[in-house]
Image: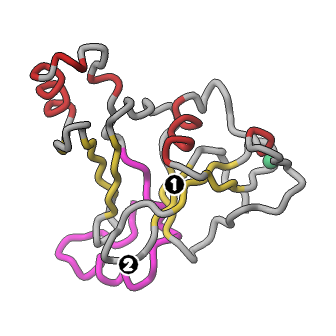
Amino acid sequence: MAKDSPKPPKTTPRAPTNPTVSIWAAQCGKCFKWRTLSTQEEFEEIRSRFAEQPFNCDNKPNGSCDDPPDIEYDSSRTWAIDKPNLPKTPSGFKRELYLRRDYSKMDAYYVTPTGKRLRSLIEVGNFLQNNPEFSDLSVSDFSFVSPKIMDDTIPSTAVVANSNKKGAPGTAK
Ligand SMILES: [Zn+2]
């Protein structure tokens, strides 16, 4: 099934021990097939300039729209779709995404080259101020915008758990 807009997604596993991203993928703007990407860096590179340069199958080595999809969008795994044109993570930093156990959202963090975890733009601003060696960076190089969990790919057990919570709207978005 082709999604209406070819935004680069990331997919997340269901393993409760490490609910983070296991597969990175982007959707071809021509044939709408999903192509897996080997690294988070490759994914972020595509995402950072997605509006100006939509992803196509032939961006991959030996890639072609004639090839079968690498991965299908379906409920066999939970999908989360990112917004286009988020900044690429600065060199030396690591951007991590964790899926909440109730599948309500993913939380974004940055880990600095010194191993410190930053949870907000305020923390990023303080870190940059206190570490002049990163004076070439600004808070605009960071984003805590997290990908949207696709409701139709959330496992039914998680939906049940979610709807049992007081006041939780279940799968409503
Ligand atoms: Zn294609």
Residue with the mark numbered 2: 159
Mark 2 burial class by Cα count in 10 Å: few <14, some 14-19, many 20+: some
| Residue name at image x 34 percent, y 63 percent | 99
Pinpoint residue 163: horizontal percent, then vertical percent: 29, 78
Foreground tag (1 vs 2)? 1
Asked if residue 40 lies left or right of residue 30, the reply is left
| Residue name at image x 33 percent, y 70 percent | 18
- Quadrant in which the N terminus is drawn: bottom right
| Viewer-proximal residue among 133 and 3 | 133
Residue 171 part of the magenta segment: yes
Disc 1 marks which amino acid? Lys
**Label 2 residue SS:** helix
Span shown in magenta: 146-173
| Residue name at image x 33 percent, y 77 percent | 16
| Residue name at image x 52 percent, y 69 percent | 152
Mark 1 burial class by Cα count in 10 Å: few <14, some 14-19, many 20+: many
Residue with the mark numbered 1: 10
